[in-house]
Amino acid sequence: MSTAIDEMTCREFVELVTDLIEGELAEAKRVEVEAHLGECDGCATYLEQIQQTIAGLRRLADADDLPRTREQALAAFRELKRTN
Ligand SMILES: [Zn+2]
């Protein structure tokens, strides 16, 4: 299970997922995250849930209220972390 070099754990993935979505992840980390996604159904599903949550919030808030949308998205992440 942990034989691969620099293999990312699910915990690390969860910690990096907000940066990934916001496009703030360094290239090297992004590669690690994507490699983990390819091997881990749980994290792929988790990312999908978050992206759907964000898409839903953006629809609700419309494009004219982005700062609040971001706040709501971060609150939703915290909620997901608690329940997972
Ligand atoms: Zn994982």
Image (spheres, rainbow, N blue to C red):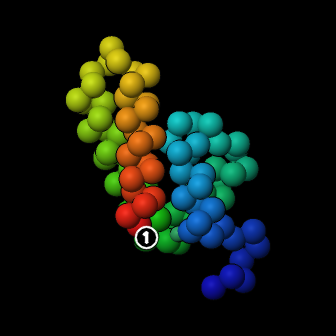
Check mark 1 vs ligand 1: CB closer than 8 Å? yes or no: yes
Apparent side of residue 18 relative to residue 3 in the rendered image (left or right): left
80 w.r.t. 51: above or below: below
From the viewer's side, name the closer residue of 79 and 46.
79
Quarter-of-image position of residue 10: bottom right
Apparent side of residue 23 relative to residue 75 in the rendered image (left or right): right
6 w.r.t. 30: above or below: below
Q: Amino acid at mark 1?
A: Gly
Give the percent coordinates (x, y) of residue 15: 59, 55
Q: Quadrant of the N terminus?
A: bottom right
Quarter-of-image position of residue 31: bottom right
Q: Quadrant of the C terminus?
A: bottom left
Which residue is depicted at the point 37% across and 28% down?
69
Give the percent coordinates (x, y) of residue 67: 44, 22
From the viewer's side, name the closer residue of 58 and 80.
80
Which residue is depicted at the point 69% across and 70% down?
7
Give the percent coordinates (x, y) of residue 52: 31, 46
User: Few, some or many C-alpha atoms within 10 Å of disc 1 (few <14, some 14-19, many ≥20)?
Assistant: few
Residue under pointer 1: 42
Apparent side of residue 63 relative to residue 42 in the rendered image (left or right): left
